[in-house]
Image (cartoon, rainbow, N blue to C red):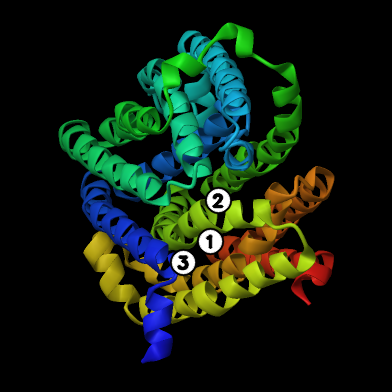
Amino acid sequence: MKFIKNTMQTQLFKISSLNSLSVLFKIGTGLVTSKLLAVFVGPSGMALVGNLRNFMTSLESISTLGFQNGIVKYVAETENDKSKLQKIIATVFISLLLIAIILSGILFYFAAYWNNQIFGTHFEYSFVFKVLALALPWYTVSLFFISVINGLGEFKKVILVTILGNVISLLVSLILIWNYQTLGALLAIVASPSLLFLVSFYFVNREIRFFEAIKLDLFDFKIIKNLSSYSLMAFVSSVIGPLVLLAIRKNVIATVGINQAGYWETMTRISSYYMLFVSTILSVFFLPKLASAKSNSETKTIFWNYYKSILPLFIIGLSLVYALRFFIVELLFTKEFFPVASMFFWQLLGDILKVAFLILGYQFFAKRLTLAFIISEIASLAVLYVASIYLIRFFGIQGALMAQVLDNLIYLLVLVVYFRKSLF
C-alpha cells in the first residue's frame, strides 16, 4: 500500500493520469468522428483523408521550421532569464509568421497543383487548399504557443489545450462531415487546428507578457542558427516521413485498390488513438527531463523509468485492444470495415516496438544529435519503403503492416546499440 501511495504522489503519475484523461477524451471524440467518416465517406474517402493528413503533417513541420522540440528545450533552459527568453520568443515568432504567410501564398495560388498531387486528377478538392492557406498562419502560431507553454513546464495547461482542441475539432467535424461528406471531412482537417489559436494564446499570455516580448530589435539570428539542427531533424521525420507514407499509400491504391488503402488508413487511425498516450507523455514530461539531464546516469534513470512504468502498461492495454478488435471496428466504423480486424496483429506488434524505441529517439532531440538522427531516420524510411513495396506484392495490404514491424525492429536494435552507454 505504501508503494502505491508513493507512486500516486509522484509527478509522473499525476501528469500521466491527467494525460490519460486527455487521451480518453480524444478517443471519445474520435469514436464519433470515425463513425461519421465510416458512414458518410466509406473506405475510399478514408484513403483521401489519410493522404491529406500525411500532407498536413509535412506542412506543419515546414511551417514551424521544425522548431517545436527546440523551442521546448530552449524555453526550459532560459525560463529564469527574462531577456534571453524574450529574444527566443520574438525571434521564433517573427520567423514562423513570415514562413507561414509565404506558404499560405503558395498553397492558395497553386491549389489545383496540390489537389492533383495529393488526391490525383480524378478528384477536385482545390477549395480545400485555399481554406488551408487562410488557416495556416493561425495554426502555426498556435503550435508555437503550445511549445512555449510546454517549455515553461506547464504540463497541465498543455494537456488542457489539447482537450479543448479535441472539443473544437469534434464540433467542426460533426458539422462539416454531416453536411458535406468527404469534402467536409477534408475541410475539418485543415480548418479546425487553426481554431486553437485563441485558446493557446490565452494560456501563453498568462505566463509571459507576449506583446511586450515581440519586438523587431530582439530578433537574433544566433537563435535561428541554434535551432537549425532541429529543423534538419524535423525535416526528415515530419516532412520526408509522411511523404514516404503517401508514396506507399499510392502504391497500395495502384496495387490492391483504394478500398484496401482505406482499410490501412482506418487501422492507422485506430493506432493513432492509443499512441496518443505515449507520444503526449513523452513530449510533455520525458523530453524536458532528457534535455536537462547532465550525465549518462541521469539519462539512464529517465530511460528505465519509462521502460518500467509506461511500456508495461502499454503492452497490457494493447493486449486488451487485440482481444476486442472486432468490437472496436464495429463500434468505431461499420461492418463494411470488418477486414480491418485482420490487420490488428501486425499493427499492434509494430506499435509495441515503436513505443520501445521512441524514448531513445527523443534523445536525438534532447541532445541535438543531428547527424546521427538524420542518418538513422533516412535509413529507417528507406527500409520501410523498400520492404513495403516488396511485401505488398506478396501479402497484399498485410505487407504494408509487416514492413512497419520489420522497420521498427531494426530501428529499435540500432538505437539500443547506439545509446548503450546511457541504457546499460
**Secondary element type, mark 1:** helix
Image position of 124 with respect to 239: above or below: above
Which quarter of the rendered picture does the C terminus lie within?
A: bottom right
Residue 325, label in figure: none
Residue 341, x across and y down, in percent: 38, 71
Label 3 residue SS:
helix
Q: Please, what secondary structure does the residue beneath circle 2 have? A: helix
Q: Which residue is mark 1?
A: 397
Q: Quadrant of residue 319 in the image?
A: bottom left
Kindly indicate whether the residue at mark 3 contacts the one at mark 1 (C-beta within 8 angstroms): no
Which residue sits at x=50%, y=41%? 152
Residue for point 36% across, 19% down:
131
Residue type at numbered disc 1: Ile
> Rounded to the nearest whole Å, what is the CA distance between mark 2 and mark 1?
7 Å
Compared with 1, 283 (above or below) is above
Cβ–Cβ under 8 Å for marks 2 and 1: yes
Amino acid under disc 3:
Leu
Rounded to the nearest angstrom, the CA distance separating label 1 from label 3 is 39 Å
Q: Quadrant of residue 185?
A: top left
State the residue lying farthest toward the bottom.
1
Measure the alpha-carbon separation of dots 2 and 3: 41 Å
Say left or right for 279 vs 298: left
Disc nearer the start of the sequence (2/3):
3
Crowding around mark 1 (Cα neighbors within 10 Å: few <14, some 14 to 19, many 20+) is: many
Where is mark 3, residue-wise?
12
Among the two numbered marks 1 and 3 on one chain, the one whose residue lies closer to the N terminus: 3
Q: Position of residue 81 (x, y in %)?
A: 60, 32
**In the drawing, does residue 342 fall left or right of residue 66?**
left
Q: Residue at x 69, y 17 (%)?
A: 220
**To which residue does mark 2 refer?**
252
